[in-house]
Image (cartoon, rainbow, N blue to C red):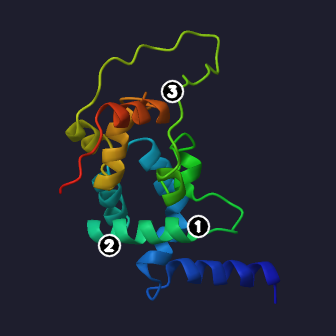
Amino acid sequence: MDHEQLASALRRLASTSPKRSKASHLKTLLPDIEAALAARVPAVDILNTLREQGLDISLRTFHGTLYRLRKTASTPGSGRKSGAAAARPNVPAPVTASRATAPLEPHKPAPSTTDAPAPAQTRIKTFEQLQSENPHLSSMQLNRLYAEQYGEPRVSNADIDALKKKYPQHTKP
């Protein structure tokens, strides 16, 4: 009995088994799916390709399964980034309660990482444009992406305190 032939037969059986779940197929394909999404391939095109190859899955099931796979791949303590985080390294971290309640700091422009001049980004995309370019993002993520086009807020705590002094809140008698 050849060990390599047996291992190969078991791998073939595992990958072609009719009892294998759609989620397990997507888990195997997750790096390739993430790469396609990072290349801005619409989810519908990915689904059509999966269907052509014999994996019939609905858009809702695809997004739900993809969400769960990303979530399990990026659990704290796993020591590795999920495929989504690895494919999009410049996406800012989500706002948490501690970050949302942290005091505002004065605006500091980001340091340039290259010596070449940065391209002028004067055109701000509409929500619909961002949605069509990023069909895999939720509306909350799209709202954040839309807001990030306007840069960091330029209001400091001192500015807020000055406004409070200038316009005090009146209490009702």
Q: Is residue 7 left or right of residue 12?
A: right
Q: What type is the residue that disc 2 sits on? A: Thr
Q: CA distance from mark 2 to mark 1?
A: 18 Å
Q: What type is the residue that disc 3 sits on? A: His
- Circle nearer the N terminus (2, 1): 2
Residue at the limit of the structure toward the front, as seen here: 173
For the C terminus, which image quadrant?
Answer: bottom left
Q: Which residue is mark 1?
A: 73
Q: Which mark is residue 61?
A: 2
Q: Which residue is mark 3?
A: 107
Q: CA distance from mark 1 to mark 3?
A: 34 Å
Q: Residue at x 32, y 30 (%)?
A: 166
Name the quadrant containing residue 168.
top left
- Circle nearer the N terminus (1, 3): 1
Determine contact: label 3, label 2, CB under 8 Å: no
Name the quadrant containing residue 89.
top right
